[in-house]
Image: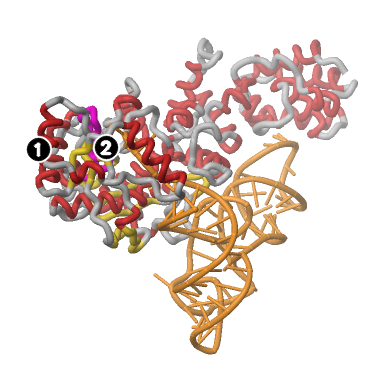
Amino acid sequence: MNPSSNIRVRFAPSPTGFLHVGGLRTALYNYLFARKSGGVFILRIEDTDRTRYVEGAIESLIKTMEWCGLEYDEGPLKGGPYGPYIQSERLDIYKHHVQILIDKKKAYYCFCEPQRIEELRRSQEKQNLQTKYDKHCLHLSEDDINIKLKSGSKFVVRLNVEPNKIIVVDDIIRGSVQFESNLLDDQILLKSDGYPTYHLANVVDDHLMQISHVIRGEEWLPSTPKHVLLYDSFGWQKPIFAHLPLLLNPDKSKLSKRQGDVAVEEYRAKGYLKEALINFVALLGWNPGTEQEYFSMDELKKQFSLESINKSGAIFNVEKLNWLNFEHLRNKSENDVLKLLKEELLRSRFKEIKLEDETLKKIIQAMRPRVTFIKEFLEKSSYFFEPPKEYEKEAVKKHWKSDIPDKLKILIEEFSKLEQPTKEDYETVLKNTAQKLNVSNGKIIHAVRLAISGVSGGPGLYDIIEILGKDETVKRLKDAIEQIKY
RNA sequence: GGCGCUAUCGUCUAACGGUUUAGGACGCCGCCCUCUCAAGGCGGAAAUACGGGUUCGAUUCCCGUUAGCGCUACCA
């Protein structure tokens, strides 16, 4: 980390459930930007809505980020110089700052009952007017306010938006965006339960934590003028804003549950590699301007830049993710795949099966170009772990002619004579036998493949035989002759 | 409804006024390789939403239309 860098960014999720892939991308971009520039990456928990709080969500969030390799420099558990990093533990900080705004007449107490607000909105809607608070309580006298406060009346604190102003939001990705203050509501800053709303807490914390760049989803762009107003009211310097394009469902709506998986945990459970998920999500809205599409985290850290982020939303397309998973799986070292395969075996119905590492490595070599997920080693080539339970019907019809059993019996005899055979020995014997029987190699090969694997596709036959070994191969050939009907 | 954002192959995207018969990747199709299935190699189909400007010249700049999306909560 470069201590001379003033760049400080944060990922600020609310703990309402699992980490969302959209959240993952936001976190990733923040993380990459921090790492690229020698800055600090902060995790802050925005739990100001008690009604939506989900037990255990913070822990799950941290665990998932850890799994993804997004290590934060300051945040919950870890601490840091600007803590606490959980907003519900910062309530008096917000109250203090709200008081500053009230003193400056930039905010005011509002004692309106929810029914009044409701009626106001209904009448505005009926007249086709914009629905917003009518500043009713702004005109309360100091005495009125004190009496109400003393009597324990419920209140909220609202932002006092000045009319007839143009508010400019400068955004790295979108350029300069203008808003009319007349169209802004007197946003509630402090709720009646004493908790701040997002707008207040976010601005106060970003300032206090000295956040230099606010990198967040585009859904926040419309409320950014309110934040700008707050920074100005406090007399604080504004951070640099970067509003990221949205991640979309296949129907182009904002990525959501219901139209597929959105939780990082779900992709993890399905067997996606973190490397693939990170690589994929990084490319949704960003590219380095070259034709490179395969990235390691280290490469992303070196190449990422805010300036090359796109403006338009991107559909989360699983097919490309699958391809990246295939590519990342293929590029892993044999030992890493071995480790993952062993873990997968322990979770599977093959957990009792003990195979030598050397054998497992041969399976990995044989199957690697044929699998996208680790679990496919077990699904697509279960015959390495158990004898075929049945034989593919189509293949039997095609390759198991009436003369096959007699021919295979001869091959079995030849195989049985071999001592410590190598892959090449099996090949030589099979070819010689085919020649002796006056049939094509292919005819024998297809039949043997079907007999020992039960299926018609897969790695080279001699690779399969070598992995199974002579005894198992011979046994399966005999069993097949018994069992396959034609 | 209001406000805002966005607009290149089905999808992710390149092009930062001319080097473009609009490039790459995923997916799809075909061929080669081959004991099968993959992988790999080669090739193919496939896009600048529409209409006006500006310019010698627009995918690129401006305006409008249309469409999509987002926001419009005492949710974030």
> Could you tell me which secondary element the residue under label 2 belongs to?
loop
On whether residue A243 falls in the magenta region, the answer is: no
Residue A148 image offset from top left, x and y in percent: 15, 31
Position of A63 with respect to A472 (left or right) is left
Segment colored magenta: A189-203
Question: Would you place residue A336 above or below residue A28 in this image?
Answer: above
Q: Which of these two is toward me, A181 or A70?
A: A181
To which quarter of the image does residue A103 belong?
top left
Residue A281 in view, yes or no: yes
Q: Distance between the residues labelled 2 and 1?
A: 27 Å
Q: Using the image as rendered, state which of residue B55 and residue A137 is in the foreground.
A: A137
Neighbour tally class for label 1: few under 14, some 14-19, many 20 plus, Cα within 10 Å: few
As drawn, is A438 to the left or to the right of A373?
Answer: right
Camera-near label (2 vs 1) is: 1
What's the residue type where badge 2 is placed?
Answer: Thr
Estimate the x, y position of residue A108 in percent, counting from the top left: 18, 43
Q: What residue type is labelled 1?
A: Asp
Figure coloring: secondary structure
| Number of the label disc, if any, that sits on residue A1 | none
**Label 2: few (<14), some or many (≥20) within 10 Å?**
some
Residue drawn at (87%, 31%), measured in percent from left and top? A438
The circle on residue A143 is 1
Ranked by sequence position, the earlier of labels 2 and 1 is 1
Q: Where is residue A184 in the image (x, y as percent from the top left)?
A: 32, 51
Residue A76 visible? The answer is no
Q: Does label 1 lie on the same chain as label 2?
A: yes
Seen at 48% across and 16% down, the residue is A346
Mark 2 chain: A
Q: Is residue A132 above or below residue B8?
A: above
Q: Mark 2 sits on what residue?
A: A197
Which corner quadrant holds the C terminus of chain A? Answer: top right
Looking at the image, residue A173 sits to the left or right of residue B9; the answer is left
